Amino acid sequence: MLTWYDPGPEWDRICGAAPFEMSGAYGAAAEAQGARVWRLGLGDPGDPDGLAQIVSRGVGPVRLGLLPRGVLWRRPPGAEAAARLQRELPGFFWLLHAGHDGRIVAPGRTVARLDLAGDPRARMAKSWRNALTRAGRQGLCVFVETGCPDWLIRAEAAIRRARGVRGLPGGWVRSLARAAPGCLETLVAYRDGAPLGAMCFARHGAGATYLLGWNGAQGRRLGAHQLLLDRAMARLRDRGADALDLGLIDPERCPGLTRFKLGAGGRPVEIPATRLLAPLWRPRRSPPRLARIGAG
């Protein structure tokens, strides 16, 4: 049985601690920017075996669908499950997805995922934990604000340009803040009234994702990001998050950032290469749509 889901708490409940790209907030931001979003489940509507959130754009019946993290299988799929889900996808699609079928158009990636259960500090590297202890003695004050301030978006973009790396466009982050109020939260470290570092996180279902951050020279020297991440982990865990996605790691291009994320206790998680599937599917009768449950 294939079910289409409306956005709302039911979809996020089913997704649990799934990657941010599966969340209702991510889909809402894509819809706010003109995309069409399909939220699909295979199996029991209340406890599906597989989930897929497809962001699609196009003209008329010719559409490109994007599954950034592929299909989320909540339990091992049967031999026919993946093929069945692919056959049942609605409309005409050229499909870009993280999976094992189709022509590779972008290499695989690695992210760092941090388990928030138990005591996250016990999983930190000794050097990282020592830096955190020193940061706690520097007289830094940490403040929390809803959303993501424009100054942080601009500062992070300037760092990316200087390093020649890619990241989330500022317009997309602003769209996310408007489309999913309360999803974003920013922690800022101050000393003597001046911000030294900041980190912005997205909260979704039973998971959370680090989106962007900035650290000045003094913030790096005083360990502002160690303090901010530690405070964020405790705050997210207390609010029911099970895992925190720290984003991409790349030992060759970003060795310092990779050491920071792994030293914090993150474990490497491989994302398959992005592949292009180009079958011309015929439109199918729409599966039953779940009524929105508890949506505000």
Image (spheres, helix red, strand yellow):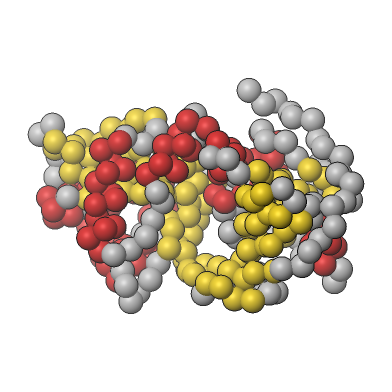
Q: Position of residue 66 (x, y in %)?
A: 62, 57
Up-down relation of residue 151 to residue 20 (above or below): above
Residue 146 position by quadrant:
top left
Q: Position of residue 69 (x, y in %)?
A: 60, 60
Residue lying furthest front: 60
Tell me which residue sits at (13%, 53%) in the image. 217
Up-down relation of residue 258 to residue 175 (above or below): below
Q: Is residue 114 visible?
A: no
Q: Is residue 158 visible?
A: yes
Q: Position of residue 160 (x, y in %)?
A: 29, 57
Near-viewer residue (140 or 175) = 175
- Using residue 194 as the reference point, say whether residue 247 is left or right of it: right
Q: Position of residue 87 (x, y in %)?
A: 84, 62
* Circle count: 0
Tell me which residue sits at (48%, 59%) in the image. 113
Residue lying furthest left: 192
Residue 197 position by quadrant:
top left
Tell me which residue sits at (28%, 32%) in the image. 143
Tell me which residue sits at (14%, 45%) in the image. 138
- Using residue 131 as the reference point, say whether residue 289 is left or right of it: right
Residue lying furthest top: 296
Near-viewer residue (37 or 71) = 37
Up-down relation of residue 296 to residue 62 (above or below): above
- Using residue 219 as the reference point, say whether residue 227 is left or right of it: right
| Quadrant location, the C terminus | top right
Near-viewer residue (100 or 140) = 100
